[in-house]
Amino acid sequence: PEPPAGAGAGAAVGRPAGTSAAIWAGTGDLALGEPLLANVTCAARGVEGACGAPRTHGRCARFVVDDAVPEADAQDLRKMIEWLMEEAWGGGSGPPSVVDLHQGSISYKEQFVELAALMEFKQISFTEEQKATYQRVRQALRGIVSRQFGIPENDLLHDFSFFSHINGSKEANTIHDEYWHQHTDTEQYGTFEYTSLLYLSTLREDFDGGEFVFEPSGMQEGERAVAVEPRFNRLVAFTSDAENPHRVEKVSRGIRIALTAAFTCNAEKAAAI
């Protein structure tokens, strides 16, 4: 069923400005005391291996966890991305900039450039602690997704991971700057089985707009759009197929920072990352 408007701590019946979606997980004054979970009807798609078990047994879902990783680690990741954006002269020319540590790329003006080349030009480098923090956070997210979906952690492998930095003061110049369109991750990225998003900034403190909206999938009666309000160190995760179409509201002020970490059970795909 869809997430009910009063389900769990932090759920609310209000609506964020600029969207008709009901707030499922709000920012409020207190962090969620326990995970907020909603089951959804699975899209009809066969998935082999451990990742397919929740889908086979009708356990497709979405969930929200607050205080997902140690606060110091989340703070360090945020500072690292802010530092990289400053070193990259503000990143992309449009609102969204992306830092992909695995592909080794970063947004700069109208294109992606090699992160290693930029860092060599600026004579900067990652510290060992920055590297260790990033790996700790990725492993922590893997553990949470594993537990929530009942997948053995050893079978749940890292897929793409990247940071997004959305600057509300910039105008979209190309279609690639239009980050707000609805999409499904398996269609957009191809390999995702589970998607997780760790927010490194907070709605109304660091930025306005930018709510994460789950749109109706059309697979069950009575569905409605529901919104997750980004909160620092909040994790939202979900099965990545058509049961969870989603979009991001336009950011109208400030900076919205998030880490996307996806997972697969396909060893060949994971090895190619």
Image: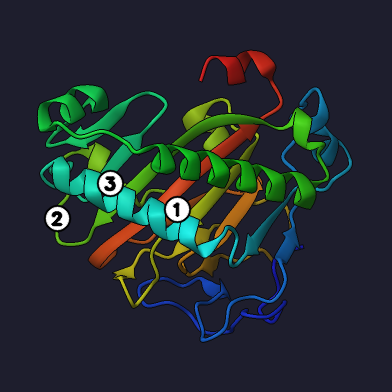
Q: Residue at x 29, y 28 (%)?
A: 105
Q: Quadrant of residue 173?
A: top left
Is residue 176 or residue 135 the one in the foreground? Answer: 135
Q: In the drawing, what numbered circle is on residue 178?
A: 3
Mark 2, residue position = 170
In the image, residue 177 lies at what x, y percent? 24, 43
Who comes first in sequence, dot 3 or dot 2?
2
Relative to 12, is 82 above or below?
above
C-alpha separation, residue under disc 3 versus residue under disc 2: 11 Å
Q: Amino acid at mark 1?
A: Arg
Quarter placement of the N terminus:
bottom right
Toward which corner of the image does residue 214 lie, by quadrant?
bottom right
Q: Nearer the viewer, mark 1 or mark 2?
A: 2
Is residue 102 depicted above or below 236 in this figure? above
Specify the label residue 247 is tagged with.
1
Residue at image x 45%, y 48%?
A: 259
Q: Position of residue 49 (x, y in %)?
A: 81, 24
